[in-house]
Image (tube, helix red, strand yellow):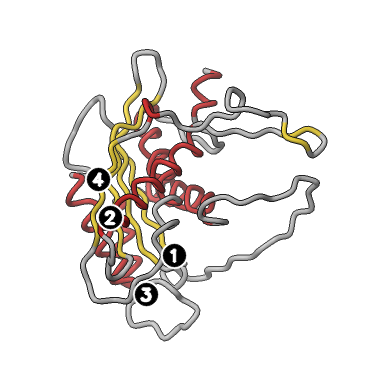
């Protein structure tokens, strides 16, 4: 996955953690939290380097083009197209607004390329609100446009809901929360508008039920940073504002 092939001296590893908590099913397994960490980290690095986050991503992808490394699963060209499209249709970086702050993320997983831009504001009560998410997807040929759009909308809202609100605590291996008054899912009043765009091409269809979820958390986190000037490293993000 990104940034394999795009940077030198790249290495990743996997560690096994023993726990008395049984793992259960969750949409977009593994990548649901990796994308938030990676894409938030990228934005933080780019700021420290004093470089443009979009141009730098595109430039890094240029280094991957023409590679013969079979371990690199993603397409640099297809990733560049979703990034360019997301920036174009969302007006990312071109619409100065003191109230609306935009965050960007782009991620490859489950065989599809996705880029997202989140519009976030801070309400008068000091709480964050996600107003809109523009999501651009390259999943190859879209067989069922209506179903595909619904999948993406649901995945984005699901991703935002978990990153923003959901916290499940355990004691002695058992969950402390036993109902939705203790375990928060996103409510209808908090769900943003999701604008979906597909890249038209003739590639074979790939994954769609999951790829739009992982980038959502990072897009929101990067937007919140612009709004409050502080990076949030722990989910759910809403906990930071309740403690403030």
Between disc 4 and disc 1, whose residue precedes? 1
The Cα–Cα distance between marks 4 and 3, rounded to whole angstroms, is 29 Å
* Location of mark 4 (residue): 195
Label 1 vs label 2, nearer the camera: 2
Return the residue at label 1.
Answer: 2
Of circles 4 and 3, the one toward us is 4
Whether 123 is drawn above or below 6: the answer is above
Instruction: First in sequence, mark 1 or 2: give its number.
Output: 1
The quadrant in which residue 67 appears is bottom left
Secondary structure, mark 4, is strand
The residue that label 2 is drawn on is 136
Of labels 4 and 1, the one closer to you: 4
In the rendered image of this protein, does residue 155 appear above or below residue 241? Answer: below
Circles 1 and 2: CB atoms closer than 8 Å: no
Marks 4 and 2, the one that precedes in the sequence: 2
Which callout, 3 or 1, points at the residue further toward the start of the chain?
A: 1
Residue at the spot of label 3: 64
Q: Earlier in the sequence, mark 4 or mark 3?
A: 3
Callouts 4 and 2 close, C-beta under 8 Å? no
Distance Cα–Cα, label 1 vs label 2: 17 Å
> For the point 34% across and 46% down, which residue is it?
153
For label 3, the crowd category at 10 Å Cα-Cα, with few meaning under 14, some 14 to 19 and many 20 or more, is many
Along the viewing direction, whichever of 3 and 24 lies nearer the viewer: 24
């Amino acid at each position: 996955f990104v940034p394999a092939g795009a940077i030198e001296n790249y290495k990743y590893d996997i560690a096994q953690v023993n726990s008395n908590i049984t793992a259960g099913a969750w949409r977009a397994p593994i990548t649901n939290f990796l994308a938030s960490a990676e894409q938030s980290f990228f934005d933080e690095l780019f700021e420290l380097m004093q470089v443009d986050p979009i141009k730098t991503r595109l430039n890094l992808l240029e280094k991957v083009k023409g590679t013969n490394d079979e371990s690199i699963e993603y397409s640099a060209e297809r990733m560049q197209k979703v990034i360019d499209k997301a920036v174009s249709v969302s007006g990312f970086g071109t619409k100065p607004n003191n109230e609306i702050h935009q965050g960007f993320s782009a991620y490859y997983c489950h065989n599809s390329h996705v880029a997202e831009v989140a519009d976030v504001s801070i309400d008068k009560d000091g709480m964050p609100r996600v107003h809109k998410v523009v999501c651009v997807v390259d999943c190859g040929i879209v067989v069922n446009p209506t179903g595909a759009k619904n999948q993406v909308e649901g995945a984005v809202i699901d991703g935002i809901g978990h990153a923003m609100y959901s916290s499940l605590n355990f004691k002695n291996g058992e969950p402390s929360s036993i109902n939705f008054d203790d375990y928060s899912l996103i409510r209808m009043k908090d769900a943003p508008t999701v604008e979906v765009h597909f890249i038209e091409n003739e590639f074979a269809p790939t994954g769609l039920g999951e790829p739009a979820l992982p980038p959502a958390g990072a897009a929101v986190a990067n937007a919140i940073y612009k709004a409050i000037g502080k990076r949030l490293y722990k989910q759910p993000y809403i906990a930071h504002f309740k403690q403030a």
